[in-house]
Image (cartoon, helix red, strand yellow):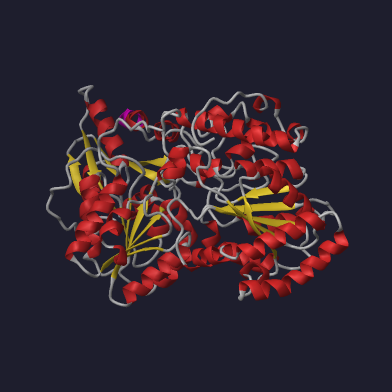
Amino acid sequence: MDSMEQVTYDLLYKVNSPADLKQLSVAQLVQYCAELRRYIIEECSKNPGHLASSLGTIELTVAIHYVFDLPHDKLVWDVGHQAYAHKIITERRDLFPTNRKLGGISGFPRMAESKYDSFGAGHSSTSISAAYGLMKAAEFQAKDSHVIAVIGDGAMTGGLAFEGLNNAGDKKNGKLLVIFNDNEMAIDEATGALEGYLARMSTSRFYNRFKRALWRVFAHVPPLLRFCQKAGNAIKQGLLQNSNLFESLGFRYFGQLDGHDVAELVRMLRALKDMDEPKLLHVITTKGKGYSPAEDNQSVWHAPGRFNPETGERIPSVNSAARYQDVFGETLLELARKDDKIVGITPAMPSGCSMNIMMREMPERCFDVGIAEGHAVTFSAGLAAGGMHPVCNIYSSFMQRAYDNVIHDVALQNLPVTFCIDRGGLVGEDGATHHGAFDLVYFSCVPNMIVAAPMNELELRNMLYTATKTPAPYSIRYPRGCGEGVEWREAAFEQIATGKGRELKSGEDMAVLTIGTAGNFAAEAIASVEQQGKYTIAHYDMRFAKPLDEALLKVVAQKYDKILTVEDGVLRGGVGEAIAKQLYDNGFRGVVRTLGIDDKFIEHGTPAELYAICGYDKEGIAREINQLLK
């Protein structure tokens, strides 16, 4: 379905579960896939989500559910945003319009949501390790179940994937099937030596055609099939010249298969199901398959927002302010033009973090290292040790995966690496797997680390400038989405004194201390309370979670006995707790209240809805101020 011609839903609403899907003939699966593709496009056009990845796995998903017996057999998705078809097939079709909405189904697999979701996913490269664990658990309990891991969208570049392959590649692990969904993409085009190796594998078309032909002929004659498997090793050495990477790790390799030929996928999966050793099936798919705009611009259509399904025209956001990620990208390029020691590093997020702005002009000074956050950090440490000033941009939620590298390789050696932590705080519809709730805490407890958070675009620009002039580890966290509309592009750079906050507004009755963009909610709340004409409230922007501005805190402690702190992060171990400790250690005897994220995981919804739930939107802050004043 390369254009949006009308598709009649003759089969879509007859399939309410995998059991219903199995009632269709193999020939009918082609029509069902077309209907499923149309349905996902229509729903995502008005309720945005991860479109292109799920369009690329429709035939593969249908074939898996057709051949295997879920939930008795276990299916583990990697990354998780490939799983929309899986959700629709597994009793959630009528709930799909609630996808990523508050109270609706998650955009990622979740064990608590469905018995068909064997393992949760949101980060990458976890599927093989988790599937191996599920397979061994089934063995311990004498359960005869197959376990399938689907890994793709760049996740095979993650080191954890190879740790899983190395551990699971034992001949006794016959119930494990790894399906490598190879679409040559993460969010952006896949890079690195592994991608080149996979491309070379795909050029050996004669061997792959020969092997598939033998499998079709002998799939139902086990003795002949086993003979072909043994003979294949000798043939492979002559045709591929080098040993197959996956077979070197103990997996029987099959590929490459057209991942959009549902009938061929069903035939192959049926044959592999009866094969008693670890198997890896390499399928070639197209991200955005079946929808021309998504195929033509796969990076943009990874998560395109709202769009017209008939024309492919995207519907722009009404917010005219610059996105924080673009402030980062444009400022980084401006700084790099002036300082030839500045280099950029990102783990597979050049367009997601806007480092592609610098990449277009200075490709030799930017490094997309693939989905490998730990490597991104240690590589940055090596650059810094060699005399460069690396700027490493990683989403807050994904930085968690590189925490040891930050401590051991950067902070312990006090190397001047600037970490730009995108998607700090509550990110919205992607939910608990993607919220950047913890970075203020996990960076603040690391010696030598400076932890800053800008309140607006200009502050981000100046903090990035300051960080590149600071000979120490420096982290800057900022949220997803658009800024406050503050003019920043023409402003002269201003170096910000490390560990120094600022008074935004004076007042007599209490003080509100904020960190980062949550300060904008507080400013609105203060204005609404002061409109009553009873009180005046001071507002301080701390700017730094570490080091805290002790001089500012002494002034606040001497003048006020009621203090409220606000942060877009977890409260336990957070900035508010650090401020309260500092105040009470120095003899403060007033009241300190803290607003932020409680000790729980926050689900998905719009950012505005989630801020309200957590109590630090404008109304929640105003409510807390009024309670303190009373």
Q: Is residue 77 left or right of residue 622?
A: right
Q: Which residues lie in the magenta part? A: 624-630
- 586 w.r.t. 65: above or below: below
Seen as rendered, the residue at the extreme top is 532
Q: Can you say which quadrant of the picture contains the C terminus?
A: top left
Residue 230 sits inside the magenta stretch:
no
Quadrant of the rendered structure where residue 609 is? top left
Residue 581 seen:
no
| Residue name at image x 21 percent, y 65 percent | 469
Give the number of callouts.
Answer: 0
Q: Nearer the viewer, residue 143 or 14?
A: 14
| Residue name at image x 13 percent, y 48 percent | 490
Quadrant of the rendered structure where residue 245 is? bottom right
- 455 w.r.t. 340: above or below: above
| Residue name at image x 34 percent, y 73 percent | 383
Residue 622 is situated, as x and y percent measured from the top left of the image, at 32, 29
Q: Is residue 36 left or right of residue 365?
A: right
Q: Can you say which quadrant of the picture contains the N terminus?
A: top right
Q: Is residue 115 left or right of residue 604?
A: right
Residue 258 is situated, as x and y percent measured from the top left of the image, at 62, 50
